[in-house]
Image: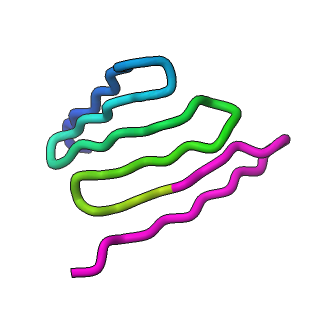
Amino acid sequence: MGITFRKSIRIFPGVTLNLNAKSWSITLGARGGPRHTISSTGRRITSMDLPGPFGWRHARRRRR
């Protein structure tokens, strides 16, 4: 298994900057509520934790 780099930095309450070796993303929203993630690669994800072992996620990629 290769070595990976991943770092999350909390900027403000509810705003997180996520870094990895090839891209970055910003996540808006807190745990337990809806979250919106915008990536430097053009990917946008909306997700929400639901009670129990359930979760909801919708991903959209930017058209080129």
Q: Is residue 25 left or right of residue 16?
A: left
- 2 or 52: which is nearer to us? 52
Which image quadrant is residue 8 in? top left
Which image quadrant is residue 44 in? bottom left
Please name the residue shown 30% across and 43% down the image: 25
Please name the residue shown 59% across and 51% down the image: 47
Q: Is residue 20 left or right of residue 36?
A: left
Q: Is residue 53 magenta?
A: yes
The image shows residue 40 at horizontal and vertical percentages of: 22, 52
Please name the residue shown 24% across and 35% down the image: 19
Quarter of the figure with the C terminus: bottom left
Please name the residue shown 49% across and 65% down the image: 59
The image shows residue 57 at horizontal and vertical percentages of: 60, 58
> How many discs appear?
0
Q: Residue furthest bottom?
A: 64
Q: Residue furthest left?
A: 22
Q: Is residue 24 magenta?
A: no
Quarter of the figure with the N terminus: top left
9 lies above or below 2: above
42 lies above or below 11: below
Which image quadrant is residue 24 in? top left
Q: Is residue 35 left or right of residue 33?
A: left
In the image, which residues are magenta? 46-64
Q: How is the image coloured?
A: rainbow
Q: Is residue 62 left or right of residue 27?
A: left
- 2 or 54: which is nearer to us? 54
